[in-house]
Image: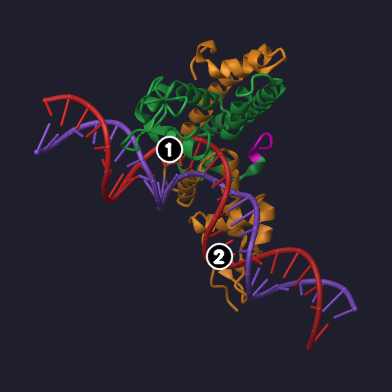
Chain colours: A green, B orange, C purple, D red
Amino acid sequence: MTAKHADIGLADIGIGEMARLSGCKVQTVRYYEETGLMPEPARNSGNQRRYGRASLERLKFIRHCRNFGFGLNAIRELLSLSEDPNQSCEAADKLASKHLAAVILRIEQLQTLREELTRMTNACAGGIVADCRVVEMLADHSMCDGEH
Amino acid sequence: MTAKHADIGLADIGIGEMARLSGCKVQTVRYYEETGLMPEPARNSGNQRRYGRASLERLKFIRHCRNFGFGLNAIRELLSLSEDPNQSCEAADKLASKHLAAVILRIEQLQTLREELTRMTNACAGGIVADCRVVEMLADHSMCDGEH
DNA sequence: ATAAGAGCTACAGCAACTGTAGGTTCAAGC
DNA sequence: GCTTGAACCTACAGTTGCTGTAGCTCTTAT
């Protein structure tokens, strides 16, 4: 039998192995297929998905991007970029820079939050709710240092 | 007419004002009602919601907790705590401390991420995708410093 | 031949809203 | 009294990125 898919014959692994080797769940792989991130794979005679090495690499790429915090739409762009290796990498750089800026912003927000929460928990001396500084601070915005 | 609700007659504002004064959307107020965070308010003759001061304070409390990053379930607990002012505030303190720990952890994760993304974008020298370090790093986990 | 385990589809649920459609009510101006 | 536009109503779909479940079928080892 000749392979109809480029994938077939090179590795021929099932969805469970794909999940295991990429560090995600089986359902996640199917979900990526559903949303077009992963191509529809070949099937064996029993209608079960069979993947090749290229698909595994693609899945690993996706998972790696997810670990970097990229959203699925950004990953879609990154995938289409990496499929066309002769174009300028400006778009990829822009995506990464934009994401980095968002991460930095989020860190700043969380740091402000951390300070407020620290202040709040430090102010709690035990006792009853009526005297609790935590509850009081949650009820009264004027007790906050900055805005949030 | 005598007020049937404790709320009524004290302020008597509509849902639009509630949203405006608490800094959220009208739908969000209705959503909080749907999920039991806010009580069902009185209605006027035209079936429109009428709120009193107590409801506004409750909504502000909820929004403030949200600004602190608490989830709705945590807020539910905090609300029921603040309704019973004679019990120990240990539970409130625990909730805040637990949340603080989660925030600290998240900051650490994002800082690792920021370093990796900075390394990635710095490595990009322009040019074409085939030579792009961004795409390369996304494809190859071994180029990462730590785990993520 | 059988039984465990893996795979299949289809769909519901999570968090915390947000947006839309298609209608009703209110308040102000004439 | 009438009109008009803003605000309000309900009900439901969509967002993001999965995860879990039910009720099957298929593979593989014994």
At x 59%, y 53%, the residue is: B28
Q: Quadrant of residue A133?
A: top right
* Label 2 crowd bin: few (<14), some (14–19), many (20+), radius 10 Å: some
Picture layout, residue D4 above or below residue B121: below
| Label 2 to label 1: alpha-carbon separation | 31 Å
Residue B4 sits above or below residue A32 on the image:
below
Q: Nearer the viewer, residue B19 or A89?
A: A89
Q: Answer yes or no: is residue B131 visible.
A: yes
Per the image, label 2 sits on a secondary structure element best described as loop
The boundaries of the magenta stretch are A143-148
Location of mark 1 (residue): B90
Give the quarter of the image for residue B10. Answer: bottom right
The residue singled out by tag 2 in the image is B41
Q: Magenta segment, principal secondary structure?
A: loop
Above or below for A36 versus D8 = above
**Which tag is nearer the camera, tag 2 or tag 1?**
2
Q: Nearer the viewer, residue A103 or B75?
A: A103
Where disc 1 sits, the SS reads helix
Q: Which image quarter is the N terminus of chain B in?
A: bottom right
Specify whether residue A48 is painted magenta: no
Q: Which mark is residue B132?
A: none
* Residue type for callout 1: Glu
Image coordinates of residue B25 in percent, x first then y, are 65, 53
Please name whichever residue, B116 or A88, is drawn nearer the observer in this view of the structure. A88
Residue A29 horizontal/vertical position (percent): 43, 33
Amino acid type at image mark 2: Pro
Rendered residue at 50%/20% (across/down): B148
Residue A144 colored magenta? yes
**Chain for numbered disc 1:** B
Q: Position of residue B31 (x, y in %)?
A: 55, 55
Tell me, yes or no, whether dots 2 and 1 are on the same chain: yes
Viewer can see residue A113: no
